Amino acid sequence: MALSKISLAAVGLLHLFGATDAYSPAARSVAHSTIVDRADELLSEYDYIIVGGGTAGLTVADRLTENGKHSVLVVERGVFQNSSSVTTVSGGFRGLIDPTLTFNISSVPQTGLNNRSIAVIGGLILGGSSGVNGMQVLRGQREDYDRWGSYFGKKSEWSWDGLLPYFQKAWNFHPPTPELVDQFDIKYDASYWGSTSNVHASFPTFSWPVLKMEMAAFGDIPGVNFPSDSGSGETGAYWHPASVDPAVVLRSFARPGHWDGIEAARANYHTLTGQKVLKVAFQGKRATGVVFVPAGATDQSQARTVKAKKEIIMAAGSIHTPQILQASGVGPKKLLKEAGVPVVVDSPGVGSNFQDQPFTVAPSFNFTTFPFQPDFYDMLMNQTFIAEAQAQFEANRTGPMSIASGNCGSWLSLQVIAPKSWKDIAKRYEAQNPAAYLPSSTDKSVIAGYKAQQKALAKSMRSKDSASYNFFLRGGYEEGSVVYLHPTSRGTVHINPADPFFSPPEVDYRALSNPTDLEVLLEFTPFTRKYFYETRLKALDPVELSPGAEVTAPEDIAAWLRTVMIPSSFHPIGTAAMMPKHLGGVVDEKLLVYGVKGLSVIDASVMPDLPGSYTQQTVYAVAEKAADLIKARA
Ligand SMILES: Cc1cc2nc3c(=O)[nH]c(=O)nc-3n(C[C@H](O)[C@H](O)[C@H](O)COP(=O)(O)OP(=O)(O)OC[C@H]3O[C@@H](n4cnc5c(N)ncnc54)[C@H](O)[C@@H]3O)c2cc1C
Ligand SMILES: *[C@@H]1O[C@H](CO)[C@@H](O)[C@H](O)[C@H]1NC(C)=O
Ligand SMILES: *[C@@H]1O[C@H](CO)[C@@H](O)[C@H](O)[C@H]1NC(C)=O
Ligand SMILES: *[C@@H]1O[C@H](CO)[C@@H](O)[C@H](O)[C@H]1NC(C)=O
Ligand SMILES: *[C@@H]1O[C@H](CO)[C@@H](O)[C@H](O)[C@H]1NC(C)=O
Ligand SMILES: *[C@@H]1O[C@H](CO)[C@@H](O)[C@H](O)[C@H]1NC(C)=O
Ligand SMILES: *[C@@H]1O[C@H](CO)[C@@H](O)[C@H](O)[C@H]1NC(C)=O
């Protein structure tokens, strides 16, 4: 395909990166977001259009453009942002300080959580959530990926073995320094990782002294292992890297990893930023293009259409991909009719099967005997310490400010955390009527899919090799940073029938709607107490801060959970699930949308259920695989 450099520059991008003359961040944002006047510079047709320039979208765009044979357009609602809130490593969550970097939708009030609405948050910049996340780099257990394949039968290529090469392709691993390894007994095995990606996984050069004891304390609990590497796909306690480029000690994410310099150097690669895709255009059942408006538009008067010859690739994330599909006529027929959207294909699974990992689900503790200095708290409160850490970081890019949001913790099975009750919990869960706790309007195929998940998840509950509970350590006063990895409740993401295009989607976690979740969570509090009081940590005289040691009756713990639990750790998945069609799936094993032609989904929405870890590492690996699948059918 012949694209002149001039037309590329006119789209407002090429010149920004080749040239050395400085562009202020503001000018850059403007250049990236005011293409509407010049939309005639866009090609009228591309081979591929990628909807969403986030974690998965930019990864796939890089891979599809690298041989120069195919033209690709990425349409991203956010703009190029490279402020210190995006790039800074220290603390990990600075992306949440600047509200221009994220979307923030108020969820449907959660009846299971005293009617609280939850802030639904994700990245809204070029690079997506990888540009605002906590930088923790973790993959699930082997069984998680084998379970995904099991929904398709024995011969599926979706499995641990099938994905391992993509984990290796996705990440460039940098081992911890020998000093850190010695000080903290860190185990790692680089064979689970790769060394070619531009997306980096590395360790800080310093960590909090108490972590050695806190990690060892997990080993005082029966059944807890220390795997050879965080990427070995096992349960246990381990150290893991962060998405940090160690050469510069800045956040490593999809934009610097797969776009900076690359897009500008490839004539077959265009990016539109500050433009929001409203819908996919169809000719019959074939997806032919996308309709978009400037991100701030409130009506369709400025709507434009760009066409794609080969494929429209959905990568708008688990909250917006289902919204766009539904608004395009791909979704549950009843919802579409209510919204006045013409039905292209009745696809009941779009927006159902919504899952995230509940957080704030265990007590917090402090230590009253504390012979360690410094600790995590110094970095928050001790101005002398902060000044020293800053000076060290500025001089050498080392020290406490090279820590993002943490590098160690435990990922434990239900057997380990509930040795007395895991069998009964799994048995009661397996015996449930699969329709009983899904919304009453749920389609038969989606119920059948949940039944398949229920069987597979009951198996995971019984497995030593599948994690249910995750405690991520901070290194001092421990806030009870516990995450529930495999919730059984299922929520929904639906277009607002009154305004499918411009109103945010209606997000309902349906938190605690399945009673098994509360049964499991009621085990988290006593187990967390056991970790502090019945291991070597007892020597530090732990005190429980919240909800308080006097809260022991299950009904009191449950009441506390309903006031504090957040049903999200920012890991939404499942809203365009890769499952067989008769199981309510939205995409097949090749990630193509059922019932239409030329449309695929590649982001976190395709995960049928959660891995026993956070999601970014898996999103990158799935995207690398998606790129190969798309190239194979080019
Ligand atoms: C605050 C936060 C902290 C997290 N911490 C961690 C962590 O520490 N470790 C971890 O493993 N995972 C973490 N995650 C999760 C992880 O980052 C995500 O799972 C992953 O990045 C999702 O990738 P994605 O490609 O599915 O979506 P995204 O990366 O979110 O990309 C979607 C893109 O689509 C764009 N978009 C949306 N709607 C439209 C539209 N209509 N038109 C055009 N573009 C659109 C968005 O702006 C965005 O750029 C965190 C996430 C968040 C938000
Ligand atoms: C982003 O910011 C970092 C830190 O200031 C800088 O080193 C890097 O060059 C910037 N990247 C781009 C593409 O502007
Ligand atoms: C999201 O919105 C809520 C409610 O307005 C606000 O309290 C919260 O700080 C916002 N969060 C982010 C990250 O913008
Ligand atoms: C939650 O809202 C529902 C419907 O408005 C109401 O019936 C119920 O009493 C509320 N519950 C709580 C705990 O406030
Ligand atoms: C934790 O305990 C220390 C004293 O051991 C105290 O200085 C600190 O304020 C406590 N932190 C919290 C959050 O209670
Ligand atoms: C604060 O940090 C300084 C410098 O590291 C240290 O000497 C001091 O003891 C710390 N103060 C407290 C209260 O821990
Ligand atoms: C930076 O590193 C050098 C060499 O290790 C060391 O001498 C110096 O004190 C460090 N600077 C700071 C501010 O920590």
Image (cartoon, helix red, strand yellow):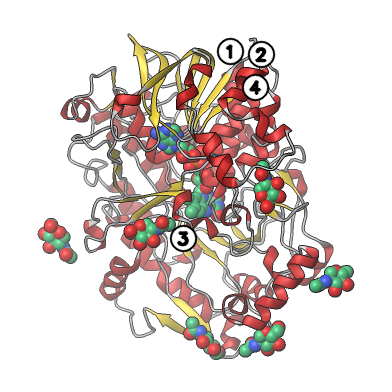
Please state which of residues 113 and 522 is positioned toward the viewer in this rendering.
Answer: 113
Name the quadrant of the N terminus: top right
Q: Amino acid at mark 1?
A: Ala
Within the image, what quadrant is residue 296 found in? top left
Which residue does the numbered mark 4 point to in the structure image?
Answer: 65
Q: Residue at x 34, y 57 (%)?
A: 517
Residue picked out by circle 1: 634
Residues at discs 3 and 2 in contact (Cβ within 8 Å) = no
Which quadrant of the rendered structure holds the C terminus? top right
Q: CA distance from mark 4 to mark 1?
A: 12 Å
- Left or right? Give the position of 424 relative to 495: right
The Cα–Cα distance between marks 2 and 1, rounded to whole angstroms, is: 10 Å
The answer to whether 386 appears left or right of 361 in the picture is right
- Residue at 38 percent across and 83 percent down: it is 548
**Distance of mark 4 from mark 2, alpha carbons?**
7 Å
Which numbered disc, 4 or 3, marks the residue closer to the eye?
A: 4
The reply to whether the C-beta atoms of the residues labelled 2 and 1 are less than 8 Å apart is: yes
